[in-house]
Amino acid sequence: MPVQAQVIIYTRPGCHLCEEAKQAIAAARCADQFTLTEIDIDTDTKLVRRYGWEIPVVSIN
């Protein structure tokens, strides 16, 4: 049985590009092939420093 990919999307509230990225992921219709985790960067100061305004960021495995 193949291992599912882990997809992480780093977002923040009110980010319209984040919403578009989530919609694009959903539109791919392959959710059975990966697990999706959404992380709000505003909950972690290290993530805010790392990503700032460069969101959304999508990380795979």
Image: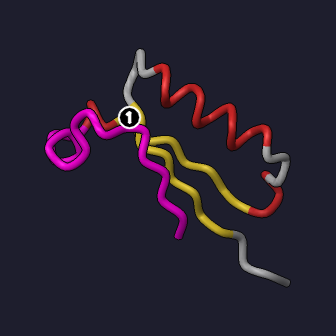
Q: Residue 52 colored magenta?
A: yes
Image position of 7 with respect to 45: above or below:
below
Extent of the magenta region:
44-61
Image coordinates for residue 2, horizontal then vertical, percent: 80, 81
Residue 28: x and y, percent? Answer: 79, 47
Q: Residue furthest top?
A: 14
Q: Which type of secondary structure does the marked residue at label 1 adopt?
A: strand
> Residue shown at 49%/46% (left/top)?
9
Q: Residues within 10 Å of mark 1 (few under 14, many from 20)?
A: some
Residue 20, position in %: x, y? 59, 28
Up-down relation of residue 43 to residue 60 (above or below): above
Left/right placement of residue 51 relative to residue 18 reads left
Say which residue appears at 23% left-offset and 46% top-offset: 47
Q: Is residue 53 magenta?
A: yes
In which quadrant of the rendered image does the N terminus lie? Answer: bottom right
State which quadrant residue 13 falls in. top left
Q: Is residue 12 left or right of residue 33?
A: left
In x, y percent, where is residue 16? 49, 20
Q: Is residue 36 above or below residue 17?
A: below
> What amino acid does circle 1 point to?
Asp
Q: Residue at x 14, y 43 (%)?
A: 49
- The residue beneath circle 1 is 40
User: What residue is shown at x 62% (from left), y 50% (from top)?
Assistant: 36
